[in-house]
């Protein structure tokens, strides 16, 4: 599969975060910022249907000099390997690639092959979701990782004692990558990977749900999450900016969900609620 890298000149980290949030509403799958250039990656086939929307976002923020660059699929892993660094979450969880040395001190190591699937641990939202897991007690509980990407959150939950997990993503590539990572981390027997949206798990019940997606999908699927949560269950959400916290809290309150935790990193937010 060939990918397109959209190179966007940005003035500062805040502008990069805002544009990332905007483009996350489109089928862009991964983002990185290097020396005042935001790089957004999207399958070439997906760009055909949304290029006008992407260009409209750039025009709305008066971005000049953005350019689309094709990346051949055979070069993708080499590109990631050259930029991928291990991620340390609070000195407890180490998320690394197979080509990194093991950590001598981490409580838990998760080995993720860095492909196009979102969830290598580098993005602030993934880090905060891991912190949410660390702050909760998932031992012997059953959970859902919605929009699982690489499956990193499901793997972390299992390493901290979750009895079993379902991991769901709508993207074929993410699903395949998740299956690979579940197997390589030794949790495939406790995690069921599924291809689809939230309807793939309709009628099931979970003690906790991890949903690191984006504002619009989270708000649109809030009723579905509520129906999937057991009484006393926890909903952990991220993938949105600080400016969206009020809307998320209001939607949760309207459904009787009680606020629990709130985290923030670099303008991104994570919230948890209890049913």
Image (spheres, grey):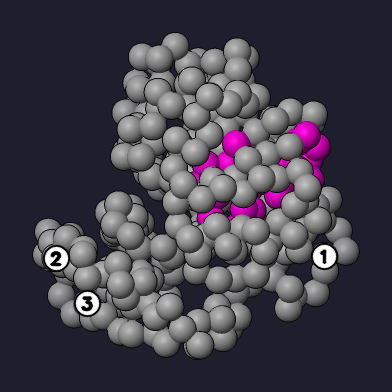
User: x, y percentage for residue 105?
Assistant: 86, 58
Q: Earlier in the sequence, mark 2 or mark 3?
A: 2
User: x, y percentage for residue 242?
Assistant: 38, 39
User: Which residue carries the number 3 mark?
Assistant: 66
Label 1 sits on a secondary structure element that is loop
Q: Left or right: where does residue 38 sit relative to residue 178?
A: left
Q: Left or right: where does residue 67 sit relative to residue 105?
A: left
Q: CA distance from mark 3 to mark 1?
A: 39 Å
Give yes or no for residue 236 being in the magenta stretch. no
Q: CA distance from mark 1 to mark 2?
A: 45 Å
Q: Earlier in the sequence, mark 3 or mark 1?
A: 3
**Mark closer to the observer (2, 3):** 2
Q: Earlier in the sequence, mark 1 or mark 2?
A: 2
Q: Residue at x 60, y 36 (%)?
A: 144
User: x, y percentage for residue 210?
Assistant: 56, 37
Residue 132 placement: quadrant: top right
* Residue 87 visible in the displayed image: yes
Residue 34 placement: quadrant: bottom left
Relative to 24, residue 272 above or below: above
Q: Quadrant of the C terminus?
A: top right
Q: Quadrant of the N terminus?
A: bottom left
User: x, y percentage for residue 260?
Assistant: 55, 22
Q: Residue at x 70, y 45 (%)?
A: 191
Q: Which mark is residue 103?
A: 1
Q: CA distance from mark 2 to mark 3?
A: 14 Å
Q: Residue at x 35, y 63 (%)?
A: 28
Q: Dots 1 and 2: beta carbons under 8 Å?
A: no
């Amino acid at each position: 599969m060939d990918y397109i890298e959209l190179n966007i000149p940005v003035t500062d980290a805040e502008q990069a975060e805002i544009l990332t949030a905007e483009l996350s509403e489109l089928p862009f799958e991964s983002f990185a910022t290097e020396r005042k250039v935001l790089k957004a990656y999207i399958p070439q086939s997906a760009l055909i249907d949304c290029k006008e929307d992407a260009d409209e976002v750039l025009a709305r923020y008066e971005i000049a000099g953005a350019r689309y660059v094709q990346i051949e699929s055979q070069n993708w892993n080499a590109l990631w390997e050259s930029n991928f660094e291990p991620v340390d979450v609070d000195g407890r969880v180490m998320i690394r690639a197979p080509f990194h040395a093991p950590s001598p001190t981490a409580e838990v190591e998760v080995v993720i092959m860095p492909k196009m699937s979102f969830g290598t641990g580098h993005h602030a939202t993934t880090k905060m979701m891991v912190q949410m897991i660390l702050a909760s007690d998932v031992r012997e509980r059953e959970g859902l990782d919605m929009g699982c990407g690489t499956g990193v959150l499901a793997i972390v939950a299992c390493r901290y004692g979750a009895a079993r997990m379902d991991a769901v993503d709508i993207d074929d590539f993410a699903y395949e990558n998740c299956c690979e990572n579940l197997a390589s981390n030794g949790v495939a027997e406790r995690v069921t990977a599924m291809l689809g949206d939230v309807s793939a798990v309709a009628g099931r019940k979970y003690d906790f749900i991890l949903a690191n997606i984006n504002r619009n999908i989270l708000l649109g699927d809030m009723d579905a999450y509520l129906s999937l949560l057991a009484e006393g269950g926890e909903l952990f959400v991220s993938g949105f900016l600080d400016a969206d916290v009020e809307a998320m809290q209001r939607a949760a309150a309207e459904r009787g969900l009680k606020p629990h935790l709130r985290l923030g990193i670099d303008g991104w937010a994570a919230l948890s609620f209890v049913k």
